[in-house]
Image (cartoon, rainbow, N blue to C red):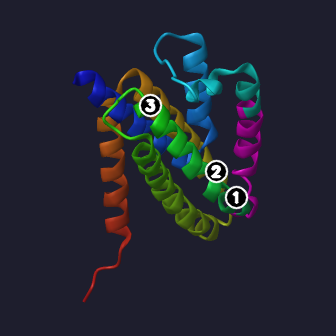
Amino acid sequence: MLAAISQILTAFGLSTASGLNAYIPLLIVALTARFTPLLKLNPPFDILANEWVIAALIVLLIIEMIVDKIPAADTLNDLIQTFVRPTAGAILFAASANVISDLHPIIAAILGLLLAFGVHATKTAARPVVTATTGGIGNPIVSLLEDVVSTILSILAIVFPIVMAIFLGLLIALVARWILRRRPASA
Protein backbone atom coordinates (compact mmCIF):
# COMPACT_ATOMS: atom_id res chain seq x y z
CA MET A 1 0.00 0.00 0.00
CA LEU A 2 2.82 2.39 0.90
CA ALA A 3 4.58 1.56 -2.38
CA ALA A 4 1.43 2.41 -4.34
CA ILE A 5 1.05 5.77 -2.56
CA SER A 6 4.73 6.49 -3.17
CA GLN A 7 4.35 5.73 -6.89
CA ILE A 8 1.29 7.95 -7.19
CA LEU A 9 3.12 10.81 -5.43
CA THR A 10 6.06 10.26 -7.79
CA ALA A 11 3.69 10.41 -10.76
CA PHE A 12 2.08 13.62 -9.51
CA GLY A 13 5.46 15.25 -8.87
CA LEU A 14 6.97 14.36 -12.23
CA SER A 15 3.87 15.45 -14.15
CA THR A 16 3.75 18.74 -12.28
CA ALA A 17 7.44 19.36 -12.96
CA SER A 18 6.93 18.70 -16.67
CA GLY A 19 4.46 21.58 -16.80
CA LEU A 20 7.38 23.92 -16.10
CA ASN A 21 9.95 22.22 -18.32
CA ALA A 22 9.15 19.01 -20.18
CA TYR A 23 12.71 17.86 -20.63
CA ILE A 24 14.07 18.16 -17.08
CA PRO A 25 11.83 15.47 -15.53
CA LEU A 26 12.07 13.28 -18.64
CA LEU A 27 15.87 13.45 -18.51
CA ILE A 28 16.00 12.86 -14.75
CA VAL A 29 13.73 9.82 -15.10
CA ALA A 30 15.80 8.53 -18.04
CA LEU A 31 19.11 8.94 -16.21
CA THR A 32 17.74 7.51 -12.96
CA ALA A 33 16.31 4.47 -14.73
CA ARG A 34 19.50 3.92 -16.71
CA PHE A 35 22.10 4.40 -14.00
CA THR A 36 20.46 3.64 -10.64
CA PRO A 37 18.20 1.00 -9.11
CA LEU A 38 15.84 3.73 -7.79
CA LEU A 39 13.54 3.57 -10.78
CA LYS A 40 12.57 0.71 -13.06
CA LEU A 41 10.57 1.58 -16.13
CA ASN A 42 8.32 -1.09 -17.58
CA PRO A 43 7.79 -1.39 -21.35
CA PRO A 44 7.08 0.69 -23.36
CA PHE A 45 8.41 3.43 -21.06
CA ASP A 46 11.81 1.76 -20.69
CA ILE A 47 12.73 3.34 -24.04
CA LEU A 48 13.40 6.54 -22.08
CA ALA A 49 16.60 4.94 -20.73
CA ASN A 50 17.97 4.38 -24.24
CA GLU A 51 21.21 6.31 -24.86
CA TRP A 52 19.82 7.90 -28.05
CA VAL A 53 16.72 9.09 -26.25
CA ILE A 54 18.87 10.49 -23.43
CA ALA A 55 21.06 12.31 -25.97
CA ALA A 56 17.99 13.77 -27.68
CA LEU A 57 16.58 14.91 -24.33
CA ILE A 58 19.86 16.65 -23.50
CA VAL A 59 19.82 18.53 -26.82
CA LEU A 60 16.15 19.49 -26.41
CA LEU A 61 16.77 20.61 -22.83
CA ILE A 62 19.65 22.86 -23.88
CA ILE A 63 17.52 24.45 -26.61
CA GLU A 64 14.59 24.88 -24.21
CA MET A 65 16.76 26.45 -21.50
CA ILE A 66 18.25 28.99 -23.93
CA VAL A 67 15.06 29.95 -25.76
CA ASP A 68 12.97 30.18 -22.58
CA LYS A 69 15.18 32.94 -21.21
CA ILE A 70 14.74 35.32 -24.17
CA PRO A 71 11.76 37.71 -24.05
CA ALA A 72 9.31 37.17 -26.94
CA ALA A 73 11.08 33.92 -27.91
CA ASP A 74 9.83 32.46 -24.64
CA THR A 75 6.24 33.25 -25.63
CA LEU A 76 6.67 31.42 -28.93
CA ASN A 77 8.37 28.57 -27.07
CA ASP A 78 5.43 28.38 -24.64
CA LEU A 79 3.06 28.11 -27.60
CA ILE A 80 5.04 25.18 -29.01
CA GLN A 81 5.40 23.63 -25.55
CA THR A 82 1.61 23.64 -25.14
CA PHE A 83 1.71 20.28 -26.89
CA VAL A 84 5.02 19.00 -25.53
CA ARG A 85 4.67 19.63 -21.77
CA PRO A 86 1.27 17.97 -21.32
CA THR A 87 2.46 15.02 -23.42
CA ALA A 88 5.54 14.70 -21.21
CA GLY A 89 3.31 14.88 -18.14
CA ALA A 90 1.10 12.11 -19.52
CA ILE A 91 4.11 9.91 -20.29
CA LEU A 92 5.69 10.51 -16.89
CA PHE A 93 2.48 9.87 -14.96
CA ALA A 94 1.74 6.70 -16.90
CA ALA A 95 5.36 5.51 -16.58
CA SER A 96 5.43 6.20 -12.83
CA ALA A 97 2.04 4.66 -12.16
CA ASN A 98 2.61 1.82 -14.63
CA VAL A 99 3.36 -0.71 -11.91
CA ILE A 100 0.05 -0.03 -10.17
CA SER A 101 -2.31 -2.55 -11.70
CA ASP A 102 -5.51 -0.90 -10.46
CA LEU A 103 -4.88 2.33 -12.38
CA HIS A 104 -5.68 2.06 -16.08
CA PRO A 105 -2.90 3.49 -18.28
CA ILE A 106 -5.35 5.79 -20.09
CA ILE A 107 -6.52 7.29 -16.79
CA ALA A 108 -2.90 7.72 -15.69
CA ALA A 109 -2.03 9.46 -18.96
CA ILE A 110 -5.05 11.77 -18.69
CA LEU A 111 -4.16 12.69 -15.10
CA GLY A 112 -0.58 13.48 -16.11
CA LEU A 113 -1.74 15.47 -19.11
CA LEU A 114 -4.11 17.55 -16.98
CA LEU A 115 -1.52 18.22 -14.28
CA ALA A 116 1.18 19.26 -16.72
CA PHE A 117 -1.23 21.35 -18.78
CA GLY A 118 -2.51 23.15 -15.66
CA VAL A 119 1.01 24.12 -14.62
CA HIS A 120 1.95 25.01 -18.21
CA ALA A 121 -1.17 27.18 -18.64
CA THR A 122 -0.37 29.06 -15.44
CA LYS A 123 3.22 29.58 -16.55
CA THR A 124 2.11 30.71 -20.01
CA ALA A 125 -0.33 33.22 -18.54
CA ALA A 126 2.20 34.60 -16.06
CA ARG A 127 5.16 34.98 -18.40
CA PRO A 128 3.79 37.96 -20.45
CA VAL A 129 3.07 39.73 -17.16
CA VAL A 130 6.69 39.20 -16.12
CA THR A 131 7.87 40.53 -19.49
CA ALA A 132 5.63 43.59 -19.32
CA THR A 133 6.39 44.50 -15.70
CA THR A 134 10.17 43.99 -15.93
CA GLY A 135 10.78 45.02 -19.52
CA GLY A 136 11.99 41.49 -20.21
CA ILE A 137 14.77 41.65 -17.62
CA GLY A 138 12.88 39.30 -15.29
CA ASN A 139 12.40 36.56 -17.89
CA PRO A 140 15.78 34.84 -17.46
CA ILE A 141 15.41 34.94 -13.68
CA VAL A 142 11.89 33.51 -13.73
CA SER A 143 12.91 30.89 -16.28
CA LEU A 144 15.89 29.85 -14.16
CA LEU A 145 13.62 29.59 -11.09
CA GLU A 146 11.19 27.43 -13.09
CA ASP A 147 14.06 25.16 -14.13
CA VAL A 148 15.29 24.89 -10.53
CA VAL A 149 11.79 24.09 -9.24
CA SER A 150 11.28 21.51 -12.01
CA THR A 151 14.60 19.88 -11.12
CA ILE A 152 13.91 19.84 -7.38
CA LEU A 153 10.39 18.48 -7.88
CA SER A 154 11.66 15.77 -10.22
CA ILE A 155 14.42 14.62 -7.89
CA LEU A 156 12.21 14.73 -4.82
CA ALA A 157 9.43 12.89 -6.68
CA ILE A 158 11.78 9.99 -7.33
CA VAL A 159 13.87 9.93 -4.15
CA PHE A 160 11.51 11.32 -1.50
CA PRO A 161 7.93 11.42 -2.84
CA ILE A 162 6.42 12.34 0.55
CA VAL A 163 8.82 15.30 0.91
CA MET A 164 7.97 16.29 -2.67
CA ALA A 165 4.27 16.36 -1.78
CA ILE A 166 4.97 18.65 1.17
CA PHE A 167 7.26 20.85 -0.97
CA LEU A 168 4.63 21.08 -3.70
CA GLY A 169 1.93 21.94 -1.16
CA LEU A 170 4.07 24.73 0.31
CA LEU A 171 4.87 26.03 -3.15
CA ILE A 172 1.18 26.13 -4.09
CA ALA A 173 0.36 27.90 -0.81
CA LEU A 174 3.09 30.51 -1.42
CA VAL A 175 1.93 31.17 -4.99
CA ALA A 176 -1.71 31.41 -3.86
CA ARG A 177 -0.74 33.81 -1.09
CA TRP A 178 1.27 35.94 -3.52
CA ILE A 179 -1.64 36.06 -5.98
CA LEU A 180 -4.14 36.97 -3.28
CA ARG A 181 -1.92 39.78 -2.00
CA ARG A 182 -1.59 41.24 -5.49
CA ARG A 183 -5.35 41.36 -6.08
CA PRO A 184 -6.88 44.78 -5.52
CA ALA A 185 -9.21 45.04 -2.57
CA SER A 186 -12.87 45.22 -3.64
CA ALA A 187 -14.98 48.12 -2.46
Write the residue at 70% across / 38% down: 61
Q: Is residue 39 above or below residue 16?
A: above
Residue underneath mark 2 = 84
Residue underneath mark 1 = 80
Write the residue at 49% across / 40% down: 149
Task: Measuring from the top left, give residue 33's x and y in whole percent.
Answer: 55, 18
Circle 3 — which element? helix
Circle 2 — which element? helix
Is 176 on the left or on the right of 42, as rendered? left
| Sequence-earlier tag: 2 or 3 | 2
Choose between 145 and 4: the one closer to the eye: 4
Residue underneath mark 3 = 96
Which tag is nearer the camera, tag 1 or tag 3? 3
* Quadrant where the C terminus is found in the figure: bottom left
Does residue 168 show up magenta in the picture? no
Question: Magenta segment, which residues?
Answer: 57-75
Q: Main secondary structure of the magenta part?
A: helix
